Amino acid sequence: MTDAAATKPWNPNSEHLLRELAPQVLGVVARRFCDFSSAEDAVQEAMLAAFRQWPQEGIPENPRAWLIRVASWRMTDMIRSEIARRERETAITAQEEPAIAPAEAIEADMDPEDTLILLFMCCHSALSNSSAIALTLRAVGGLTTAEIANAFMVPEATMAQRISRAKQRIRTSRVPFGLPTPEERRERQPAVLHVLYLIFSEGYASSIGAQLQRLDLAQEAIRLTRSTRALLPEDAEVAGLLALMLLTDARRTARTGSGGELIPLDQQDRSLWDQAAIAEGSALLTLALSKGNVGLYQLQAAIAAVHDEAARAEQTDWPQILALYELLRRVSPGPMVTLNHAVAVAMVHGPARGLECLQPLDSDERLSGHYRLDAVRGHLFEMLGDFSRAVHHYRTAASKTTSLPEQMYLMTQAARLEEPHNPPNGKRLGPA
C-alpha cells in the first residue's frame, strides 16, 4: 500500500494532516462509488491504515492519493463481498469492477471542490435539518459524536442514533453526488451555513480535550465558507458568516497563554489581533449589511466587530452590543442568545439585571445543565460582590465542562476569589 516516495517524517502535527484530508478523501470516494455510507467506512479504514503505517514508513509524497487508493481498494473488496453474498452470478459478469488508478491518475481525477460537494450532499432535503447538520459535522467537519452532541446539547447516544439514521436515509434515497442546482443551493443554504458555523465554533473553542482551540477545524470552516460564497456571491448571510469567522478568528493568537491556558477577552493583548482579518471581515460585513434583510450571522458579525473595534476592553461599546443582541433575540431566539444577552445587560445595567435575565434559562432543558450558565452566573455574582455564590457557580461550571482549558480557567477564578491577598476585579465578562 505504500507509494514509492515516502520521504516526509511523521510528527505530532501529522494527525492534523489526516483530519484535514479525511473529508476531501471521502468526497472523492463517495463521488466515484456513489455510496456515501460505505465510502465513509472505507475512508475510516484508510485512516487507520495510515495511523499504523506512516509513523514507521513515513508520509507518502502524495498522502491524499494514498488514502484515496487504499479507500478505493476497500470499496472494491466490499463490492466483491456484496456480490458474492447475494450470489448474483449475472451481476458478476455484467458489473464492471472499479479500476484502482495509480496515484497520478487519482490526483488528476479529483475535483477541487469535492469537500464542498460533500457538504451540500449531506444537507440534502431527504434529511431533516438536525440530521443533515449532524451528519455533515461528522463527515465534513470530522467531529466526534461526543463533540456533535455537545453542540446540539443532547446525550451522545441520542446523537449516535441520529447520525446512523441519517446515513441510512442517504443510502435509501439514492442522493446523487454532485453540486446542487441553484435552486437546491438556496434550499440547503440554512443547513449548510449552520454546519459551517458549528465546525468553526468547535475549532475556535473546542468542547472536549486538552486544547482550547483546533486550528485545523477553524481554517477548514473558513475555507469552505469562502467556497460557499463563491457559489452564492449575492447571499448576504454567507458573507455575514464569513465576516463573523474572520472577525472572531482574528483574536485567536491572543486567546491562549504560553501554557495553552485561556485568556479572557478583557485581558488579551490586542496588539496580537490579526488586523488584516479584522479589515477583511469588516468590509464583508459592511457589504452584507448594505443588502438589507439583516440575518443571524450578520448580527453576530456586527457584535464581533464592536469588540474588535475597541482598542482597550474598557472602551467596548456595550450599549451597542446590547442593542444588537436585542435584535438577535428577535431574529433568532435561543438559549445561547439569551445567555449572551444577559451578559450585555449586566455590562450596561448592572449584574442584578443580568441575573434576572438568566432565570428563564433554568427551565430550558437545552441549557439548564450546561456549564456556561453556571459560568456566567459566577461572573455576575462576582460583579455583584457576592463572592461565595460566585465561587460556587465557578466550581459547578468547572465540574460540568469537558474542555480542560475551560475547566482550569474556571477553577482559577474560584481560587482567586478565595484568596484574601488577591482581591477580585469583577471584570471578566464577554467572549474570549
Image (spheres, rainbow, N blue to C red):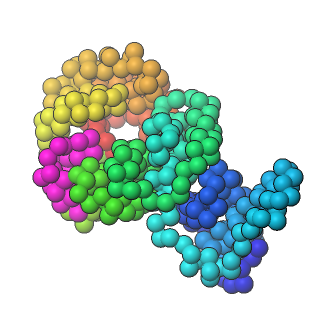
| Image spot of residue 349 (x, y percent) | 15, 25
- Answer left or right for 71 relative to 323: right
Of residues 424 and 164, the one nearer the viewer is 164
In the picture, residue 40 is in which quadrant? bottom right
Residue, x 26% and y 20% (percent of image)? 357
Instruction: Report x, y in % for residue 418.
Output: 40, 27
**Residues in magenta?**
280-306
Q: Is residue 296 magenta?
A: yes
Residue closer to the observer: 191 or 125: 125
Residue 148 in the image: above or below residue 339:
below
Residue sitting at 28 percent across and 33 percent down? 332
Residue 391 located left or right of residue 232? right
On the picture, is 207 further left or further right than 382?
Answer: right
What residue lies at 75% left-to-right and 64% top-to-bottom?
95
**Mostly what secondary structure, the magenta segment?**
helix
Can I make out residue 1 in this image? Answer: yes
Residue 283 point in image, percent of width and height: 18, 60
In the displayed structure, would residue 377 be above or below residue 406?
Answer: above
**Which quarter of the image is occupied by the N terminus?**
bottom right
Q: Which residue is found at the position 14% from the left and 34% from the top?
A: 323
Answer with the quarter of the image where residue 102 lies: bottom right
